[in-house]
Amino acid sequence: MSAVPHAAAAGRRASGRRVAGIPPLVVVAFVMFTTTLASNAPSPLYVVYQERFGFSPATLTYIFSAYALGVMVALVLVGRLSDQIGRRRVIVPAMALLALSAALFAGAAGTVWLLAARGVQGLATGTLTAAATAALVELEPHRDRKRASYINTVMFIGGAAIGPLLFGFLVQYAPLPRVLPFLVELALVSIGLALMVLVPETVERGPVFRWRLQRPSVPSPIRPAFAAASLTLAVSWGVGALYASLSPSIDRQLLHVQSHAAAGAVLFAFYGLGGVAQVLLRRWPSRITMVTGVGGLAAGMALVGWGLINSTVALFLAGTVLAGAGGGLAFMGSLALLNEVAPPQRRAEVVSAYNVVGYVALSAPVIGVGLIAGVAGLQTATEVFTAAVVAVSVVAVVLTVLLPSDPLARLSDDELVELGLDPSAIASGLG
């Protein structure tokens, strides 16, 4: 017997208990905020490390991609662990790993330290986010999934946007620029860890523990919709990865903007506007959201490319605003479409496959940009990436437009059975 059936009752009991006067829901929300802040905050520092340790743009993208690899390993190895042993029992060790990554960054004495810090950070993030997302639902006093998802989105957006802005200003204006930002991060993580230790468990541990891999899988009847959703996700996260890893280098080398604070502000605008678009337009239908988002993303990247060709900061910033908003919508719409078509009993497998696509897109394109930059220069590499984004965006839009309005309408009885659905119930409108 697993722990999952007991989660509802345990969650209701836990939601009423306060931690040092703070509702446990707020504690977990703070943990989510801190995790996404830590994951995105180092971006303005990459150019500092590059100058100090003398590595190439390709090496910089490897450092960034170590994070994506760590997240993927965590998703596959421990993606379901919190269902078995409990949310807090997974979140607390993950927070300790996050603290370790901050310590590695603060003490970094070479490239290997940075690779290790990002890899540990990825392991911590991948382990923590799945458990914390589930805990937010279970700790919401009325078990309101929409409200819990909204809180999750706001914390994710807030951390992703504020992290680079905070670190950019600390690097630019505060003493010890390679140490102090991570001491601030370590303080936030320590506060979250201390509070999280006291949060009541929301899952009652089952009598038998069975560990198994979170294996990605996509049922064949929904593969067209999955292809549209995952390609849209790949474009969105690929552009986000470029900004997170190379945006400060682009600002400095191609636009001649030397301020670390300005680099952090650019990332704040990119992530923040994507989040604002998600919050304001969250009620749009999934396909309209996807098409609008991908279209805005492609148009924004075209402006970015034009701004780089002409070394025009205003065009680059306008493209960043449009790409950020479009990327946020593209991600939100693709996830909504996936939730519409994925059969409930296989949703974890499908989401796992979707996440794998996302994290491959988070690393592979920026590694390619780094390799091209080493041969042809950063501007050429960025222009090639921009052209590829526009081309893939067109394909994603076409695939999305061609999808049927009702994903079940054109499926045969055998395909419905493969999805675990009752053909007679679907035919009578009960499915």
Image (tube, grey):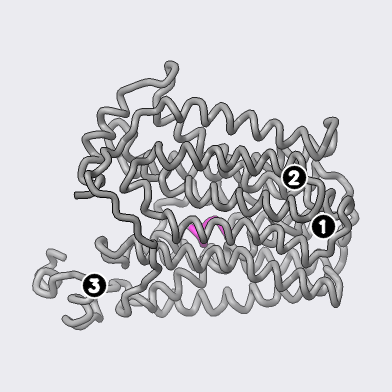
Q: Earlier in the sequence, mark 1 or mark 2?
A: 1
Q: Is residue 243 left or right of residue 274?
A: right
3D distance between C-alphas at marks 1 and 2: 12 Å
User: Callout 2: few (<14), some (14-19), or many (20+) C-alpha neighbours within 10 Å?
Assistant: many
Q: Which residue is mark 3?
A: 419
Earlier-in-chain disc, 3 versus 1: 1
* Mark 3 to mark 1 CA distance (whole Å): 47 Å
Image-based side of 352 in relation to 184, left or right:
left
- Which quarter of the image is occupied by the C terminus? bottom left
Q: Which residues are magenta?
A: 326-331
Q: Is residue 344 above or below residue 166?
A: below
Left or right, residue 357 beside residue 57: left
Q: What residue is pinned by disc 2?
A: 264
Q: Verify whether residue 259 appears in magenta.
A: no
Determine the residue positioned at 49% across, 79% down: 398
Q: Which mark is residue 249?
A: 1
Q: Nearer the viewer, mark 2 or mark 3?
A: 3
Q: Position of residue 20 (x, y in %)?
A: 44, 17
Query: Is residue 395 in sight in this rendering?
Result: yes
Indicate which disc residue 35 carries.
none
In the foreground, 353 or 108? 108
